[in-house]
Structure formats: C-alpha cells, structure tokens
Image (cartoon, helix red, strand yellow):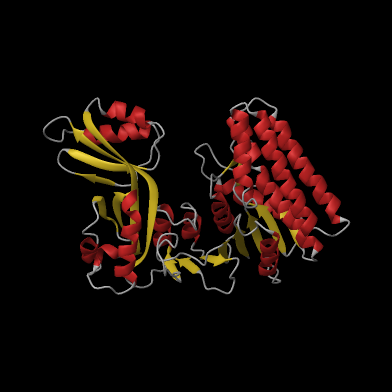
Amino acid sequence: MRVLKFGGTSVGSIKNLIAVKQIINDSQPKIVVLSAMSGTTNDLVAITTAIKEGDQIKAAQVQSDLQSRYDLVIDQLITNAKIKPQVIGYVDEIFAEIDRLSQEDFTSQIGEAIVAQGELLSTYIFTHFLKQEGVNATLLPALEFMRIDKEHEPDQFYIRQNLKRVMAQSTAGDIYITQGFICRNYEGEISNLQRGGSDYTATIIGAAIQAQEVQIWTDISGFHNNDPRFVSETHSIEALSYDEAAELAYFGAKILHPQTVEPLRTNNIPLRLKNTLAPQAVGTVITHRSRGEGIKAVAAKDGITALKIKSSKMLLAHGFLSKVFEVFQRYEMAIDMITTSEVAVSLTIDTITHLEAVVRELRQFAQVTIDHHQSIICLVGNEVTQHPDTHHLFKILKDIQVRMISYGGSNHNISLLVATADKKKSLELLQEYLFHNVVA
C-alpha cells in the first residue's frame, strides 16, 4: 500500500481537486493525506489572533468570508442530491464549532482546536466528492490515531496500534482519506505537528503501515537544484539520499518539511516528490542511496540572526562554551551554524524569540555582537567536502562577504552565511558555476 499526501495548493481549487481524484483513482489501495485547502489555515490563524486580541468583530468577519468560500466550493463540486445536504450540514457544524470556540476565553489549546478545522473540512468534502464520482473511499479520522507525547514527538507505538484499529473498524475501501497536520497531545487535547506537518503525517503513517512508498504531491516537480524564485533555468533532481534531502529541507527548500524524512529513513521506505499539475513529470525519489558526485543542489534559509560571542578574558576559559550553550538551552533556542576561535564563538539562530533575554545573560560573561538580516546558503551533495572541485566555490564568491562557513560538520553539506541582501547574487553565481559549467 502507498501513502500519498496532497498539500493545500493541490486541493485549493475545483480544478485541482478533480486532478487529485484522477491521480489517486487507479484501482491501487492507498492512504491519502490531505492538507487544508489553500488559504484556510491562514484564515483560521487570523481568527485565533483576532480572538486573542479581543477583536470579535474581525474574527466573525474572517469566519464569514471563509464559510462563503466553502459554500461556493460545495455548490460547484458536489452535485449529487443525496450527498450535497450531508456535506452542507457537516460544513455548517464545523463553522458552528469555530464560532463556539471563538466565544470562550482564549487559550493556546482553543487556538489549536480552531486551526485544526481546516483539515477536517477538506477531507470530508473530498471524501464525499469521491463517493459522488463512484470511488470506493473511506474517511479515517486522524484524531483517533495521531498523537504526540510530552516531548511533542509522534507517539509511534500508539499511532501504529490505533491506525490498525481504525482501519479494521472502518468500511473497507480502495482509498482511505485522512487529515494531515492535526493530532492529539498526550492529554487527549487537539494539537498539531506545526506548519508543514502534513508531510510529517504522511511519512509517520507510511512507517506505521510499512508502506511500499510515500508520495508528496505539491505544485512543483520535486527538489530543484536551486531556488526558482531567485534563479532562472533551474531543473528538478531525479534522485537524492535521505541525508541530502533532509539537509535541503532544513536549510530552506520549501517543498519538504524538515522532519519528514526520518520515519522513512528508519524503515528504508522510498519517498517520491511529485507535481499535482504535471503528474507525468519524474519528480524526485529519495532513498538510502546516494547517486552521483559533487554538489547537487543549493538552498537558502532566510530570517537568520548571527551572534559573535567573545570571552571577556584574554584566552578562552575552561567552561566558556558550555556556559554559552546552557543559555540557549535554557530558552529552547536551536542553533543552526557554529564556528569557534581561541577566544570567541560565532553562531546563528532562526528566531529572535527570547533574544533580548539570551543576550542579557551572555553579556554577564562575554561581549556580544549581533547581525540581523542574514541568510544561510546550503550546498548539498554526496561527500561534497571530499570533492576535488569544492574549493573553487570560494573563488566564485570572492566578491561576496561571507560571514561564516560550516565545512566538515557533515559530509553532505557546506553552509555559508551571507547578508540577505547578497543572497540572490550568491545563488546566481553558484548556479552559473555549479550547473552551467562556468570555469572558476
């Protein structure tokens, strides 16, 4: 059995919903994981923000506009006279629940419950559309088997056991439809796997059922060798290893959620990235095998802040680094890159939450310099640090001020920190050298 996940854009219009039906209706058993329809999660987040700020009028207006859009989708997509009242009734119940939650005193749990309604809407509507079209489809409620533990990690044993139970109790179908992103926490409250978590849902399910393959369907044909938003003439990469894909996902390639690869790596299950609007395109397949040499792709991650932390003593005192890391651990702030010298350490973070408190503590024993508006450029490939042509990169970027370099921490990744203002030029220069055979 395969697991196929379709993102918000893939289910964001009548045309795309019909395209998804055509892709999955091939008489092969599968579990289909759906995100909320495009734009829905943003609106639900806007509702929760308005409630939190006490702006009930704005919350009601956003909710009304959202429901009107769903009324239009139902009117155009569902034409069966018996099925249509069921779908209308369910959608009305969902928006009544949003309204009920909106009237309560705001808590983070209420916010998560409101945001979860998007996936419930998309899966119910799509399942009944499939039934209308004569497809043997069954809805599997993710809230009955997806759970995270106290550390906010997937409870793999619980998921595996309860997914089997839910499938056994459900009406047998050729296609099972379930929600991505949403889950319950260890106390049974509605929660989620954070933004992009539908990818993660698909691979967790794939591992739980030992799927033949997991497919992630989006609006782009797999990983590209560079960011097509900033660089022209990019192309998709046919094959990557789990390690290479994980590096690209973490450092800015938006097509894949960074956590997605791990459940499949552990179980050696292939992951395939496909384009909903171009289903015949090869896309990218991700397995344990590394193919080819040298750098295969470049990705960039924005919103980076760099800190240079210099010991207040002449020499790097014993325990200095541990004191630095203890501060970041205390505020649960992850570090992306790090370089050290005899008396200083430079590092990067991708959030400024708690930054003032962190800097205040660091300055009790060190001098701290902060650079905002930075970007990490990540160059990924098989054994790239060992490749004989890698050193030419530094000639190519001779006119770019490189703030930090991470080289050797991973055999599959070289990371460079540059000012975000220099990111586009850096990506273009690397594209010319790496993929257009420009001699350094």
Q: Residue furthest left?
A: 314
x then y, percent, for residue 365: 22, 27
x then y, percent, for residue 279: 59, 71
171 displayed left or right of 54: right
Image quadrant containing the N terminus:
bottom right
Name the one closer to the observer, 32 or 73: 73
Report whether residue 190 is seen. no
Report whether residue 45 is seen. yes
Residue 315, picture quadrant:
top left
Name the one closer to the observer, 272 or 312: 312
x then y, percent, for residue 172: 76, 60
Image quadrant containing the C terminus:
bottom left
23 displayed left or right of 385: right
Residue at the image position 55 percent from the left and 45 percent from the top: 193
227 displayed left or right of 11: left
x then y, percent, for residue 213: 56, 66
